[in-house]
Amino acid sequence: MKQRGISRYFAFLLFFFSIAAFSQEGAIKLAEGVYAIKGPGAGINTGVVVGDRGVFVFACDLRDYDRRLQAIRSVAGDRPIRFVANGHHAGDDTMCNHLFAEQGAVVVGSKELARQLLPYWPKRAAQELKQGKVKREYLEGKNVAMAMPAITFDDKITLDLGNHVVELISLGKTHTPDTIIAWLPKEKILFVGDLLFVEHHPTVDDRSDVGNWQRALKTLAGWSPASVVPGHGAFAPGNGAKPLLDQDRYFETMRAKVKAMKDAGKSVEEIKKGVQPELGEFAKWPRERAIPATAEQVYRELPAK
């Protein structure tokens, strides 16, 4: 009897952890009809809004397309994917666009995103084919036009899904020159793409504007969002503005340390190599490889004496 009880206990644990794992694989509910799909590891996260008039999808990685499409269908049923948008032009965000467009979805993006994506997409498609990490039929013979925004906007556009409204807002040059976020004003939910890396060193380079990035983070935090889905890193329903403010503190810490090292006579190369131990609570975050480029861009943005 005792052995049988132990067996049942372990069977229960196996069932429990299987359910927990499945929930992380699928769509995570943020509000009625609003979901997010966690990317594997630090992979990009996907936002999903299921409305009366169809489905909105924000960001999708082609290497993980099959799983994400299955997760979307699990909550959307047979409702069509009506709109697709991206946080910016990078391949882990935009390389599913053409597949959704082939199913009848309309790709929506800023004019700046379209300008960035047009020359980038064919090169990225060729790279993906060469690496062989996606199904060849997803890219062979595909036309870049299918991935491009069919509807473009300058600053903001509103998408009406019936019982849900999604506002796409161009933030200009932050992470890249074409940063876009999706805001659900009724539910107070944000999909922010690569504007936010949760507890990971963010990707920053000479295309970035860290000062404007920080202003955007503060502005969005001031909207008092109920839930924020980052481009990369963990999230949970009800996480609020804290992740946005944490990344602002990260940049503020980086700026203070880079300035102090510069004022002490350190060269930019010395700062890039030596700043990590100075970052305090942020020093042990993953993606340390991103630190030197971030330090260099922050250095560039420091005011001249």
Image (cartoon, grey):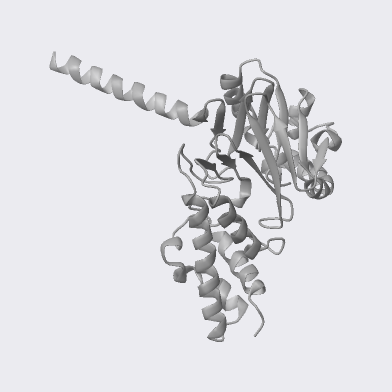
Question: How far from the left and from the top, in percent, is residue 41?
Answer: 52, 42
Location of residue 304 by image quarter: bottom right
Q: Quadrant of the N terminus?
A: top left
Location of residue 63 by image quarter: top right
Q: Residue at x 49, y 40 (%)?
A: 226
Q: Residue at x 44, y 60 (%)?
A: 284
Q: Nearer the viewer, residue 303 or 296?
A: 303
In this rendering, position of residue 143 left or right of residue 231: right
Tell me, yes or no, if residue 194 can be seen here.
yes
Q: Is residue 206 above or below residue 87?
A: below
Q: Quadrant of the C terminus?
A: bottom right
Tell me, yes or no, if residue 148 can be seen here.
no
Question: How far from the left and from the top, in percent, is residue 97?
Answer: 74, 34
Q: Nearer the viewer, residue 63 or 160?
A: 160
Location of residue 118 by image quarter: top right
In this rendering, position of residue 300 left or right of residue 222: right
**How many numbered discs, if any?**
0
Question: How far from the left and from the top, in percent, is residue 4?
Answer: 19, 14
Q: Residue at x 45, y 70 (%)?
A: 277
Q: Nearer the viewer, residue 298 or 43?
A: 298
Question: How far from the left and from the top, in percent, is residue 50?
Answer: 62, 24
Q: Residue at x 79, y 42 (%)?
A: 126
Residue at the extreme top of the image, as rendered: 1
Residue at the extreme left of the image, as rendered: 2
In this rendering, position of residue 170 left or right of residue 74: right
